[in-house]
Image: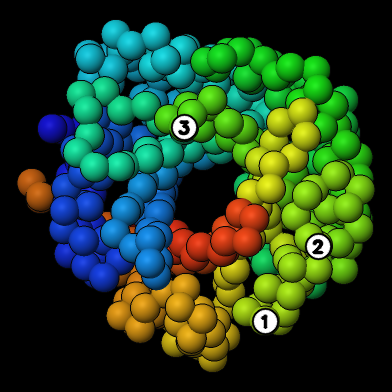
Amino acid sequence: MSGTVRPLLLALQPLLEPALVPPWAFRNVLATASGVPDTLSGGYFECRLGRERGRVDLLLGTLGTDRRKGLAIEERWPLAWRQEPLWRQLLAFYADWARPSSWLGQRIPLTLLEFDVEGAPGPVPVPGFHFCIDPDFQRHPPDLDARTGVPGGGFDTEALLELVQTATTLLPRGGLESPTLEQLRVCHEQLPAGGRLLHLSRMFSRAGAPLKLNALVPRDGLATWLSRIGSPVSPEQVLELLERHAPGQHLAKLDLALGPSLGQRLGLELSFRYGAPGTPEWERLLQGLSAEGLCTAEERDALLAWRGPARLRRDGGGWPLRLERDLVLKLVLDGAEIQAKAYLFFQPRFSLFV
């Protein structure tokens, strides 16, 4: 299937360790997402670890700088997808976002499609949709090793709420209800200095199409922020996990279940952006997760081997691509349960010197 991400995904398969992406899981991912046009800026394989191992989801992202590369051309998408109301609305959003003079295009620097892949896929996938609500995202990408947040703070609260309501009105299920907007207001207004709200997500593939809010919060202001926004998650538990697994991480990247009130589910990202794959920080983190039964030794070794550049050649020839690879780990707290996930980041780049 030319003009889609399928050739890229196939070229990536030899780099994916079966301990993280079993062959059967890759086949399901490929069958689910092969219809997406090849306009992406990068993506992630989302791998569940430990006792939840095996299931793999896929996220495909497009930066605002790449939004006019054909993403909004309906004919590039499968006909069966275009006939579904949900996809018609998503494509209408892309059409608006891609216009050179688009109000949304000037304010949303990144969108992502997330494909939850449970078992054999149906003929038309139902994705989750993420859009970035941080105008500084491309100029100042989130860096969990940084000792301070980014000065400036992006949108003021009213501008943020206007962006969110305008964007969600174009998406399936429509704009946010007033109690949810008020909760979003509180989350933004209570951010400590250096804190940022990064993404809003609508998970159409899940029951009730829940919302998620992604935030970056300085560690020394995290407990106060969680308390002031009414999170039912224990701030002490989150800080204890950070101290145990990533004591040098000065910023906390979280995703929260957003609604009229906040849900008990919270995701905490762990990552080190510096050094080679085998740096002591990564080894200590993964050894700790393995010791607690949150990942297996086989998964630990496969994760340590993932990061770093690689050379990639797609079927059908063409100039080889340089593939940038990185890794993010997430601990998901849901009541008393803790689950570990790995996000294998990939970003293909054209380079004369690969």
In this rendering, the answer to whether 134 lies above or below 90 is: below
Coloration mode: rainbow
**Front-most of residues 204 and 291:** 291
In this rendering, the answer to whether 119 lies above or below 227 is: above
In this rendering, the answer to whether 73 lies above or below 48 is: above
Residue 274 picture location, percent across and down:
58, 77
**Label ID, residue 235:** 2
57 vs 229, left or right, is left
**Quarter-wise, where is residue 271 in the image?**
bottom right
141 vs 315, left or right, is right
**Quarter-wise, where is residue 47 in the image?**
bottom left
Asked whether disc 3 touches disc 1, contact meaning CB atoms under 8 Å apart, the reply is: no
**Label ID, residue 206:** 3
Residue 3 picture location, percent across and down:
21, 32
Tag 1, which secondary structure? helix
Q: Residue furthest left?
A: 316
Asked whether disc 1 touches disc 2, contact meaning CB atoms under 8 Å apart, the reply is: no
First along the sequence among labels 2 and 3: 3
Residue 284 picture location, percent across and down:
54, 88
213 vs 311, left or right, is right
Q: Would residue 89 be visible to someone looking at this image?
A: yes
**Quarter-wise, where is residue 334 in the image?**
bottom right
Residue 31 picture location, percent across and down:
19, 38
Amino acid type for the residue under numbered disc 1:
Arg
Amino acid type for the residue under numbered disc 3:
Arg
**Front-most of residues 249 and 202:** 202
Residue bearing the label numbered 1:
244
**Front-most of residues 56 and 44:** 56
In this rendering, the answer to whether 177 lies above or below 219 is: above
